[in-house]
Amino acid sequence: MDNAKKTKLNKEEPAVGARRRFLGQSALLGLAGAGLLTGCKEDAPVTKAASASASGHAARLTSEVEPGQLDDYYSLSSGGHSGEMRIFGIPSGRTIKRIPVFNIDPMTGWGITNESKAIIGTNPDGSLKYTTGDTHHVHGSYKDGTYDGKYLWVNDKMHSRIARIRMDTMECDKITQLPNVMGYHGTFPDKRDPVDPNINYTTRVFCGGEFHMPLPNDGHDLDDPSKWGVLFSCVDAESMEVRWQVRIDGNCDLVATSYDGKYACSNQYNTENAADQAGMMSAERDACVFFDIARIEKMIKDGKFTTIGKSKVPVVDGRKAANQDPKTALTCYVPVGKNPHGVNASPDGKYMVCSGKLSPTATVIEVALVEKWFNGELKTERDAVVAEPEIGLGPLHTGFDGKGNAFTTLFLDSQIVKWNVDAAIKQFKGDKNAKVILDKVDVHYQPGHGYASMGETKEADGKYYNSGNKFSKDRFLPVGPLHVETEQLIDITGDKMRVISDHTAYPEPHDAIIVRRDVVKTRQIYNMDDFPNAVKPENAGITRNGNKVHVRMMSVAPAYSIPVIKVKKGDEVTITLTNHDKVEDLTHGCAIPMYNINFIVNPQETKSVTFKADKPGAYWIYCTHFCHALHLEMRSRFLVEA
Amino acid sequence: MDNAKKTKLNKEEPAVGARRRFLGQSALLGLAGAGLLTGCKEDAPVTKAASASASGHAARLTSEVEPGQLDDYYSLSSGGHSGEMRIFGIPSGRTIKRIPVFNIDPMTGWGITNESKAIIGTNPDGSLKYTTGDTHHVHGSYKDGTYDGKYLWVNDKMHSRIARIRMDTMECDKITQLPNVMGYHGTFPDKRDPVDPNINYTTRVFCGGEFHMPLPNDGHDLDDPSKWGVLFSCVDAESMEVRWQVRIDGNCDLVATSYDGKYACSNQYNTENAADQAGMMSAERDACVFFDIARIEKMIKDGKFTTIGKSKVPVVDGRKAANQDPKTALTCYVPVGKNPHGVNASPDGKYMVCSGKLSPTATVIEVALVEKWFNGELKTERDAVVAEPEIGLGPLHTGFDGKGNAFTTLFLDSQIVKWNVDAAIKQFKGDKNAKVILDKVDVHYQPGHGYASMGETKEADGKYYNSGNKFSKDRFLPVGPLHVETEQLIDITGDKMRVISDHTAYPEPHDAIIVRRDVVKTRQIYNMDDFPNAVKPENAGITRNGNKVHVRMMSVAPAYSIPVIKVKKGDEVTITLTNHDKVEDLTHGCAIPMYNINFIVNPQETKSVTFKADKPGAYWIYCTHFCHALHLEMRSRFLVEA
């Protein structure tokens, strides 16, 4: 099929219908290589909706934020294989911050300072254990069903780590590696305790394991993937320790949690537990697995668990075979569309919506019916499904407007579909007049995640929806073979969606949450006393202990407090620097040429670096962060005697 | 002085005048710590100009780029201590690309792949020599006085390296470390050859050394900074080898080149050659040093040079004492305002403009008069100065509109001043009616570099001016103690400047060039044959040589060509991956969990990684860059036998 024909197919409803039916079959694999499922819609024009917005439709929301005005929302975004997190302003799309997490950031000194290295984790020789990561999903801590502005969590799919971001400083303060997990993908905090009604806030974060691997992964069973396993993990929101793990069937994609605190769930592909692509697509249905948190924790409290390898984390068995009796089951595998992608909780707390990916459907699961299944009051897991509308090709992720409507990204159609959940339920019950699909709008191109303003909370406000598009192609000035991604902001206040702007994002933001600005309360200046190693006039200076030299230095614009530092070749040098400036935004840098040392100190902040003075000579420690008219002149001599 | 009083002073012209006179004195150092020169104008309001633009002035240029429309200009920007380069779209301010240069970028694999490590430079053990950098200035290659779209160069102040970016792929292809240089700051390509009229394009790049250091820097003379020196370097634009160096007095800040190819110049602070801050500010004037390129190269051709330490680069003496006779001098030190910051060539080719920084003036130097000095036809170097208008407090950098007007950032006033060069020359000659200052506009806050669209070329078009502000404070949603910087786009088409948008930039863009979009001609897909190690069906597979295993693999969405790779613990594994997809934007990733391997391959690109298989177990190589509906399922097993 050549491109011209394919594009044409995309535009003609009957043909699209034919493709949908076709995709319902199991013949996908053979076609995959032919480009049918790939992002290669070459010449899709700007949609009518987008053109209309461009040519001066009646003014609704716009992305313009006038000079001196603030954005209305924070978009707190993952950064994919950049290893970082990001903060965008909405509606402007401006990148207000990069938050280094699993990457090295020479600007801030993340991965260079002693403090950040301790958070990331080091080898015995002091080098970083990992310098890469792959962040996918960012979610915030909850109270009463909405964000409390305290923490964010983000996963590292590559090295199975969960990082926590303090929302007061928007910096990473803890990273935990999950034992015996490979491909930690979806993550979500709980919204309240399953048992204690007084705990109406987040105390756990759930982590979906994706890839099967030998348990433990020590080199045994390499040739027999049928013996490999996958774990779903629960991390303590405060201590960041792993509380427990559940062995499951299938590969977790996203994670969601119920508003009542009772359930975490994950949409799963490869419930076949296969090790090859054909096997991963052989079943017509995969699952959304629900975890009964109270039962799991009761079982662990009762000591009914095992451990794996060197890990001391308690593990229970959540595989299908071990959970046949609903009344004692820890897990409930609800059958959903083939190789689903994404599960999202509706803001009314009633439903979980899984997107079909290889099925052109969304599956609506009623949480109350899952509870009935666990109580033995439902015949089959599938009976928890209350709707499964056909919504378009390649549905991946769903956001909500708080008015009963869902907005799902259609990867293959390069569209967002707006559909009504209640209408879908009526249709599923047989109402042929139910109007499920309310609107579709083209996006550019191949959307992955889509999410609405406050859409993951009870305060979903139905203003903006962001379509995170994986391909941008011709949407921005050409910059060579590597393309930026398109974040398209959509006004969802009206009956019709309207694309109001194309923003850019360095690859690869996957998921984000769009948070009302009043939720976020940051500290704009540190408290010096929060740093136990803060340098003050009384302890400033240079001390030596054997070959260990400690330089305790202060910065006050435009000077460091120590103009000349002299050490001997071979010394282990620690420089601790406290910024005594108190003016907001008056940050200083500290670079040592040829020593690969580079970090900043924000107002009232303290950081330290330790390195070996292995190169004799004179080096100018200089300020890298423009601070003052005499910024260029802000430097000290670092002298290393041969 | 408390903040309220200080802010008041900023608003009252007479008081500002008083401050200007005051700053003309040499009493600055004592006051520096009191915050007078620091970025602490706490409550400056939105200017009238900006408010006007916000409230619907007659529409001129705006920053809005409608969905599906392209920007008009590329802003090619440095990234400061992030170590990277960036491409912004103008007028939208969208970040279209980050170009990793001196930093590690897990997304692209920069600093991880064998190819990028070879460009950055490695230690004998294969690890990167440096993982940080500090980029300040980006400039492009010229032909006939304007950009030819071939190369960009950017400096690393921290480790004295110059990097070249190929503009067809917008990727770094060469990095050269300058010998015996510390604090390589300003950089500029030449615009034609000083001798050969047929060479009307860039063949050299000049590099200003900033910090004094022992020559060579081997541990001698640590305690006698009076013996330390500074070198100005010339790098070959094609080979990227260092052609020659000139020892100079003073510390180079920026570099500029004349349109006739005869001169490079650099504004200098610390012509006192002092080692402490007070000494660096003791003289009332510093200099703009001009280099006579033809004379320097003649001298080197004649073998009249020395070398320093292990470096083989020829070095000539350009210090004042050795260049007293204009007719043989290699350098001409033109006295300018105290501790100047920035030198920029006017688009008509006539003038170099230095900003005063600690002097409230700009100094206009006529290039033809510098030539006269070198010919022995000018009495003193200072006679090359044709204007020195008072323009405001803390002038740093100047852009041009091609209509005879200059636009200079005023760091302390937090303003941009528009002034007329010819009027300033008339005023300097005694015309008291000359109207030099045409307009001022507030920016937010403390501008560093400012640059106009095509303003560094003969095609300066007077459309946009970008004010790169060092402080943003309250201009964006708060995100904690670390603030983003403000890039303010100013419409300079009219008599009055108009701030049209506040864009954000991760710290710390210093300088950029704004380039018309037709100048840039990129390749959107690689040519597979450009990669000598490309993997094709005929050489794909796994080969072993002793304990060295080479995996030659291809990617075609949604699969890698080798589903299972088995090696032994201790093997040295090289994976070479060629992306056989040809669809624009169809990039694949390649991550190996627990092995810290992460890179991408764009369409038709080849990359490789080499690592030791030191951890037994099963690992899923997976695609990190969303490529296809079956992207999640795109993975291969990497098995390491214990």
Image: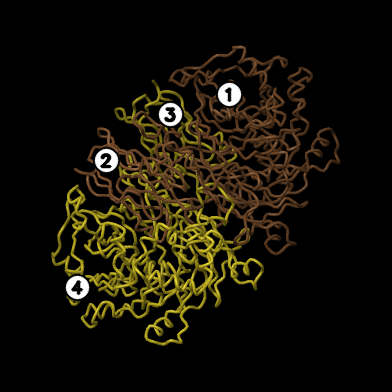
Chain colours: A yellow, B brown
| Residue A205 visible in the displayed image | no
- Label 1 secondary element: loop
* A620 lies left or right of A338: right
Mark 1, residue position:
B273
Mark 3, residue position:
A565
**Where residue B482 sits in the image (x, y, percent)?**
48, 50
Label 3, residues with CA under 10 Å away: few <14, some 14-19, many ≥20: some
Identified by mark 4, the residue type is Ala
In whole angstroms, how far apart are the C-alphas of marks 2 and 3? 42 Å
Question: What's the chain of the residue with tag 3?
Answer: A
- Count of marks overlaid on the render: 4
Label 1, residues with CA under 10 Å away: few <14, some 14-19, many ≥20: many
Disc nearest the viewer among 3 and 4: 4
Disc nearest the viewer among 4 and 1: 4
In whole angstroms, how far apart are the C-alphas of marks 4 and 1? 79 Å
Q: Do labels 3 and 4 share a chain?
A: yes
Disc nearest the viewer among 2 and 1: 2
Q: In which quarter of the image is the C terminus of chain A?
A: top left
Mark 4, residue position:
A329
Q: Do labels 4 and 2 share a chain?
A: no
Question: What's the chain of the residue with tag 2?
Answer: B
Mark 2, residue position:
B613
